[in-house]
Image (cartoon, rainbow, N blue to C red):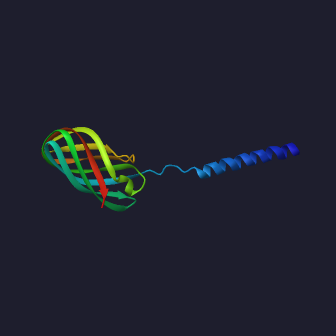
Amino acid sequence: MKNVMKKFGINVALIALLVGVAGFSTPSRAETGQVAVVFTKGGFIVGVGGGEGVLTLRGKHYPFTASGMSVGFTIGASTTKLVGRALNLHGPASIEGTYSAIGAGGAVAAGAGGVQLQNANGVILQLSGPKVGAEVSAAVGGVTVRLK
């Protein structure tokens, strides 16, 4: 009987320890939000742009501004209406920061643009949409996003 009690006591202690450890570990709660932004860009060699957008997360809307610049081959001007997803969000404030990407794109009269950007918080913006204007670019650029 002592052996059974001893084994039973050890098993109960082991189960309690495992339940306690599991209770203290919290899984990552990264979320995905919807993003819509209108971005206007223009330049010759150095491109400069800016725009406004909205992050929709958990049914709430968070307006933001976007500004950026690119250095490389850029000629012309364009306006792009981008929509997509913001991945790895840990609340609305994690969308803020400077995003970087290396890409090439172009539009003549009307075309399509797409981009994937990441900030230091690990948030990834996957955006695409129509481009209106006349611009050709192959540039290294960055975009800074700030909540209003």
Return the residue nearer the eye: 101 or 46: 46
Q: How many marks?
A: 0
Residue 19 seen from this side: yes
**Looking at the picture, how far across and down is residue 79, in whole percent?**
17, 50
Q: Residue at x 22, y 55 (%)?
A: 51
Return the residue nearer the eye: 18 or 45: 45
Q: Quadrant of the C terminus?
A: bottom left
Question: Which residue occupies the extreme right position in the image?
Answer: 1
**Looking at the picture, how far across and down is residue 2, in whole percent?**
88, 45
Left or right of residue 22: residue 108? left
Q: Residue at x 21, y 46 (%)?
A: 69
**Looking at the picture, how far across and down is residue 122, in whole percent?**
39, 46
Q: Residue at x 65, y 50 (%)?
A: 19
**Looking at the picture, how far across and down is residue 37, in whole percent?**
25, 54
Query: Does residue 61 sit above or below 128 in this rendering?
Result: below
Return the residue nearer the eye: 14 or 46: 46
Left or right of residue 147: residue 74? left
Q: Quadrant of the N terminus?
A: top right
Query: Does residue 62 sit above or below 32 in this rendering?
Result: below
Residue 132 seen from this side: no
